[in-house]
Amino acid sequence: MSALSVEAAFDESLGIQYVSDEQGNAVSVIVPIELWQAIMSERETAYLLKSEVMKRRLLEARRRQRGMSLEEVREKLGI
């Protein structure tokens, strides 16, 4: 197994760091958790939009003007 070193961040404004092997080949990336969560959220949305049913549901939810309070949900569910 070769040794790894952390190089300087490529994009300091995002806090991204590249992990490289002894030859300088990038083998991994370290990203801040907030950026990772945003990436995963976008990925999940893209996956859901592949389904026409889910696409319709997401668009309907986006068009809704008002959500329901916890009390309204409880009453509707009878709990």
Image (cartoon, rainbow, N blue to C red):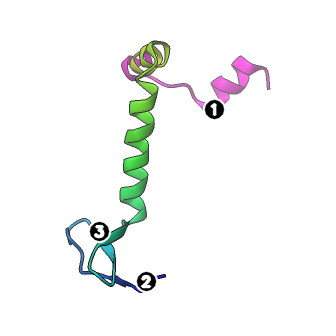
Question: Which residue in the structure is indicated by mark 2?
Answer: 2
- From what the image shows, is residue 37 above or below residue 32? above
Q: Nearer the viewer, residue 53 or 50?
A: 50
Q: Residue at x 42, y 86 (%)?
A: 3
Q: Are marks 2 and 1 in contact (CB under 8 Å)?
A: no
- From what the image shows, is residue 47 above or below residue 6? above
Question: Which residue in the structure is indicated by mark 3?
Answer: 16
In the rendered structure, the answer to whether residue 65 lies left or right of residue 16 reads right
Q: In terms of image quadrants, where is residue 58? A: top left
Helix, strand or loop at mark 1 = helix
Residue furthest to the right in view is: 79
In the rendered structure, the answer to whether residue 13 lies left or right of residue 27 reads left
What distance separates the C-alpha of mark 2 from that of mark 3?
Answer: 22 Å
Residue 78 image position (x, y, % from top left): 78, 20
Q: Is residue 66 magenta?
A: yes
**Labels 1 and 3: the sequence-earlier one:** 3
- From what the image shows, is residue 44 above or below residue 40? above
Residue 6 image position (x, y, % from top left): 33, 82
Which segment is the magenta one?
Answer: 60-79
Residue 30 image position (x, y, % from top left): 38, 69
Q: Residue at x 66, y 29 (%)?
A: 71
**Labels 2 and 1: the sequence-earlier one:** 2
| Main SS class of the magenta portion in the image | helix
Helix, strand or loop at mark 2 = loop
Q: In terms of image quadrants, where is residue 45? A: top left
Going by the numbered disc 3, the residue's amino acid type is Ile
Q: Residue at x 28, y 70 (%)?
A: 15
Q: Is residue 46 magenta?
A: no
Q: Nearer the viewer, residue 27 or 69?
A: 27
- From what the image shows, is residue 53 above or below residue 4? above
Question: Which residue in the structure is indicated by mark 1?
Answer: 70
**Labels 2 and 3: the sequence-earlier one:** 2
